[in-house]
Image (spheres, grey):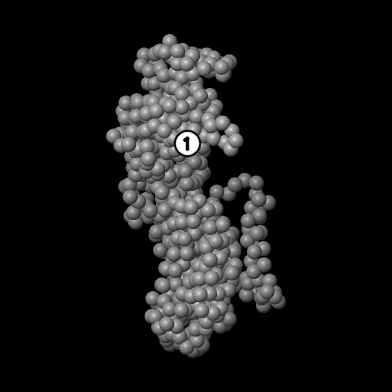
Amino acid sequence: MLELTDAVVSFSSPGGPVVRAVDGVSLTLPAGSFVVVIGTNGSGKSTLLGSIAGTVRLDGGSLRLAGHDITRWREHQRAKLVGRVFQDPRAGTASSLTVLENIAVAACRGRHAGLRWATGRQLREEAARRLAAIVPGLETRLDQPIGSLSGGQRQIVTLVMATWQRPELLLLDEHTAALDPAAADRVIQATARIIREQGLTALMVTHSLAQAAALGDRLLLIHRGRIALDVQGAAKRRLTADDLADRFDALRRGDQLDDAAARTLAEAYV
Amino acid sequence: MITLLSTWTFGLALALVALGVFVSYRLFSFPDITTDGSFTLGAVVTAVLLTAGVDPLLATLGGMASGGLAGCTTALLHAFLGIERLLAGILVTTALASVNLVVLGRSNVPLSGVHTLLDRAETLLGLPLERAGLSAAVAGEAAQLVFMLIVVGFAVTALWVFFRTQLGTAMRAGGDTATMARALGRDTGGMTLAGLAIANSLTALSGGLVAQYQGFADVQMGIGMVVWGMASVFLGAALVGPARLGGALVATAAGSVTFRLLVAAALRAGLDPDWLKAATAAVVLAALVAPRFLSRGSHARTH
């Protein structure tokens, strides 16, 4: 379970105004929920994700995950509980290391990395089994540098790495945005499958309204650092990509849609 | 014959610098200027310990440890105080220039009449070589070469083993892609610390061995060492092409010996020794620039 309470992240540019990228967001995700987050560019959705991952420091509020208060934990400490997949396939894997070596690092996530051999036979067999289950054929490439894989394949390996040890929370930061549509589709299939099979708690930021409509059991629309729309349960299941497109149009038409109005709308919508 | 053997021995001694630069520059993408300072530091500390009557092996290890400390200092400046990589190395190397002078007491200390690690190697390994039919002079030189081969072979093996353990693999991953390593729970600051400690220990070991081999320690002897190391790394990579970790380590050591042989050939052909460092810098520049002209595609080099 993830509990974000009154989270505030502000940025200030020299001489410029202080911008609240995350403006008092409170959010509770019960264990096993799969939440999709959408929002326009600059809405604060990536900052929100970063503040959970630990790449962005919270200026106010608190964060609890799986019974730990992780507000003050540093990024690499939060990795004990959090698995992550990035937008850029190069950010989530070490290009010059082989597929198996990358997986070996993931296998030590949140544990002490000692002087034991990194890529033993047991790990190799387990890696082959897990990769083959998702993309048959990928297991033959364990000894190749991961940089030689396509972007889609790398994202799938990154997913396998992020969930190698079951994370308390899986963070997906537009992890299909850099891929061509066919590869994006394969990665999304793999994502949905891994989340379902492991019963993971997941937070996925996406630019794709189709993904937002089709995936997850809850949808958050972030606007100006706040939750402008929160759809769950049956309403989420009924939600279509067209509905979301309408919502986005409304937001774009007037960025004049002020916070109070957005909340009213949100309440009316749910 | 003896000159050729000596070139090999020197090339092997400097291969430890090349291996250190391989660790800092190739594995951690850290252009570590500390190399220049820690090479001298290793030589100076070893020389001072030797002249104080410390056992040669302990003196050499002491020099090596001092280099490790220098590397830690640079890493601390960078990872925990946020000083830029190059600047952190420049600061530590500049400070080390004073440290080296103070530790040595003057700018040059001869090691004649002091029992060194290489003398010990000569006694241990020279006799069997003499019995095998070599003249006494050649056997002595060959014994030192064999000793350097053993040291470099041990260093290559140790690095290969270490960087294939869980910790070593995580360190390589962090040097390659820091975001990935942090997302998987690794403290990249601590890893840089360990990486630079290893790299500069090797460099300082090289400094200590070179001082013992040539028979003196000099506060100037480290100048240009980081560039020498880079030249060896590039030359080694050019010799073998894309290689995995083990291959790249062996290639780096081979690159150092090859470069030393090329330098010897160039000097014999009439190159003014004053131009040696400029020539080394030119080689590194060429190696850095050449890939941009030779190929548009990206060669994924692996280690």
Q: Residue furthest front?
A: A15
Toward which corner of the image does residue B224 lie, by quadrant?
bottom right
Chain identifier of the residue bearing label 1 in the image: A
In the rendered image of this protein, does residue B233 appear above or below residue A183? below
Three-letter amino acid code at the position of disc 1: Phe
In the rendered image of this protein, does residue A227 appear above or below residue B28? above
In percent of width and height, residue A36 lies at 43, 24
In the rendered image of this protein, does residue A51 appear above or below residue B218? above
Q: Nearer the viewer, residue A106 or A203?
A: A203
- Residue drawn at (59%, 69%) of the image: B223
Instruction: Say how many tags the image has.
Output: 1
Left or right: A131 with respect to B141? left
Q: Write down the residue under mark 1.
A: A86
- Residue drawn at (41%, 72%) of the image: B61
In percent of width and height, residue A262 lies at 48, 16
- Residue drawn at (45%, 16%) of the image: A263
Q: Secondary structure at mark 1?
A: loop
Toward which corner of the image does residue A50 lie, by quadrant?
top left
Whether residue A164 is visible to the viewer of this picture, yes or no, is no
In the rendered image of this protein, does residue B151 appear above or below residue A238? below
Q: Residue furthest top?
A: A268
Q: Quadrant of the N terminus of chain A?
A: top left
Q: Nearer the viewer, residue B230 or B81?
A: B81
Mark 1 surroundings within 10 Å by alpha-carbon count, few (fewer than 14), some (14 through 19), many (20 or more): many
In percent of width and height, residue A61 lies at 39, 32
Q: Quadrant of the C terminus of chain A?
A: top left
Whether residue B189 is visible to the viewer of this picture, yes or no, is yes
- Residue drawn at (55%, 27%) of the image: A41
In percent of width and height, residue B89 lies at 54, 60
